[in-house]
Image (cartoon, rainbow, N blue to C red):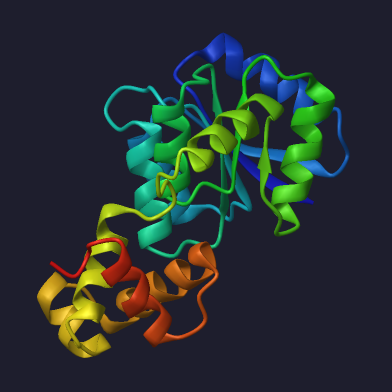
Amino acid sequence: MIRVLLVDDHPLFREGLRHRLDLDCDIEVQAEADNGLQALEILKDTQIDLVLMDINMPQMDGMYLLELIKEQEMSCKVVMLSMHDNKEYIVAAMRHGADGYILKDVPGKELIEAIKKVAAGKRYFSADVIDTLSQELASGKQVLVTQREQLVLRLISLGMNNKRIAQEMNVSVRTVETHKRNIKQKLAIDCTAGLVRYAIDHGLDR
């Protein structure tokens, strides 16, 4: 059973979404939230496998909640469900580690498929979202590495070990290790020397 948390500030939309998800025997809507702050409190006390949430919400928006979920290494997956198909929102979601990004106008069948694929450890993006990402990648821009990850790359290129990087960033060594692991996965680089070369090639060593 996939335990889902719905996060959207429109009650009527959540009601329709819950009704659609409840039709599938493999998915259970465990809880709902009006905003990211409320969702964060739910995640502290409730076992959730996947968070399905909007971006623009009061008090705490979806992007900030996504960043907190990934930085705190919560076990749940995150799928953004948004009306925004412009590159700024999509790229920001990718940078913050979203496991999926789906537009709100997709058919219910596709939404169910997305939830199941992400819950199984895969990533899922709507066709229009993939087109936008492809165009951005074709332009040569680095869309996947967050600003904090860029800082980690810079400190690595300066010869700092994990403990020193943690001190510089005022975070734990474990957090640094997580950042490095994520960077390697995103850039398909499997060694520290490769990370140093990437940082130098992209001017992050300055």
Percent position of residue 99, x then y: 58, 49
Q: Height in image: 71 above or below 157?
A: above
Percent position of residue 72, x then y: 37, 63
Residue in the image at 21% along x and 71% along y: 154
Percent position of residue 143, x then y: 42, 46
> Which residue is outermost to the top?
12
**Residue 164 or 86: which is nearer the viewer?**
86
Residue in the image at 44% along x and 45% along y: 140
The answer to whether residue 78 shows anywhere in this view is yes
Residue in the image at 79% along x and 19% along y: 107
Total numbered labels: 0
Q: Is residue 112 toward the left or the right of residue 48 in the image?
A: right
Residue in the image at 71% along x and 28% along y: 127
The answer to whether residue 31 shows anywhere in this view is no
Q: Height in image: 4 above or below 129?
A: below
**Residue 28 or 169: which is nearer the viewer?**
169
Percent position of residue 194, x then y: 42, 80
Q: Is residue 34 toward the left or the right of residue 170 in the image?
A: right
Q: Quadrant of the C terminus?
A: bottom left
